[in-house]
Amino acid sequence: MTAQIIDGKAIAASVREKVAGHVARLVNEHGVTPGLAVVLVGENPASQVYVRNKGKQTKEAGMLSVEHRLPDTTSEGDLLALIDELNNDPTIHGILVQLPLPEHMNSDLVINAIDPSKDVDGFHISNVGLLGTGQKSMVPCTPLGCLMMLRDHHGSLSGLNAVVVGRSNIVGKPMAQLLLGDSCTVTIAHSRTMDLAGVCRGADILVAAVGRPQMIPGDWIKPGATVIDVGINRIPKEDGKTRLVGDVDFDSAVEVAGAITPVPGGVGPMTIACLLANTVTACCRAKGLPEPEGLTV
Ligand code: GUN
């Protein structure tokens, strides 16, 4: 039996539609336009594509989109001064500093300079702590998108065995916190995990976030499991062009899993949709307005 394909593109479109509806209400009933500022330092080509897409989708949802593109020679002090300006700008409700930053900058210092209530990435140490203690926080966009897809597919996740492969601050660790919050039994596995295949085979929910193309084969997957593939890896094709693949070997996994996200068209579109959702949430909290339902955990 082949797995059901979890259509991230379609779920993301419905999140964006909800976001646009809330934005219209905020504008028409409260005279408030949610504003997102994205800061890009340097010329990283992948980051440039992400930032362009974020700006486009922010505007399409009816929000204010502000982009700051700085040369990679920018000093850390100048970046911190810009963040301070954005923290104090009442038209801006969300601030995102695109990672990775150039090597001469301390990313932790920069991220922790963002006002936590405007930290739509959920990377500020205060938001990490709030999420880890089950309190209201800004939730990192990629794990939030994964959770929305899992809830959409399963309804309740309570009691399921979830294995997250990857321990990054951006995906692996917050993903584990969210799954724990939904009453899964959670394992975080990584490159040093003994018997990684065996650990994966115990998963009812397998989230792959390692950044290694097609690392997880079908025979590591429990029959009927739900597989969320966070990887976006570009690999060469025989004709000299390239194609995108995930961290899971889709062709073998789709024969074993119960449901699986494709790459592209799975987690990717959900990340930006959740960034828009977080910006609306941050705006409502800043204005003391009721938070939109279904756009955060
Ligand atoms: N670089 C790769 N993913 C992300 C993300 O989710 N947020 C930011 N700020 N930078 C990234």
Image (cartoon, rainbow, N blue to C red):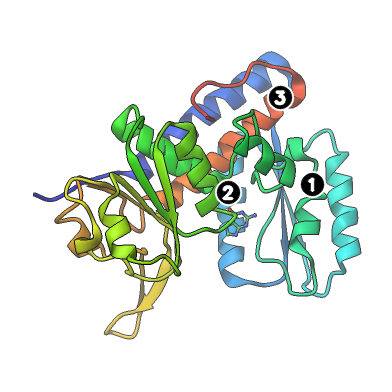
Residue 94 in view here: no
Q: Which residue is mark 2?
A: 56
Tell me what residue is drawn at x 50 percent, y 53 percent: 172
Q: Are marks 3 and 2 in contact (CB under 8 Å)?
A: no
Q: At which x and y percent is residue 90?
A: 84, 33
Q: Is residue 15 above or below residue 237?
A: above
Q: Residue furthest front?
A: 194
**Location of residue 292 by image quarter:** top right
In terms of secondary structure, where does tag 2 sit?
helix
Foreground: disc 1 or disc 2 = 1
Give amino acid for label 3.
Arg
Q: CA distance from mark 3 to mark 2?
A: 24 Å
Q: Residue furthest left?
A: 1
Find out if the beta carbon at label 1 lies less than 8 Å from the nearest ligand 1 atom. no
Q: Nearer the viewer, residue 122 or 5?
A: 122
Q: At which x and y percent is residue 100?
A: 66, 66
In this picture, residue 12 sits left or right of residue 288: left
In terms of secondary structure, where does tag 1 sit?
loop
Give amino acid for label 2.
Lys
Give amino acid for label 1.
Ile
In this picture, residue 107 sits left or right of residue 260: right
Q: Is residue 197 above or below residue 53?
A: below
Residue 114 - label: 1
Q: Nearer the viewer, residue 51 or 250?
A: 250
In this picture, residue 262 sits left or right of residue 179: left
Q: Earlier in the sequence, mark 3 or mark 2?
A: 2
Q: Which residue is mark 3?
A: 285
Q: CA distance from mark 3 to mark 1?
A: 16 Å
Residue 277 in view here: yes
Tell me what residue is drawn at x 32 percent, y 37 percent: 160
Q: Earlier in the sequence, mark 3 or mark 1?
A: 1
Q: At which x and y percent is residue 219?
A: 19, 63
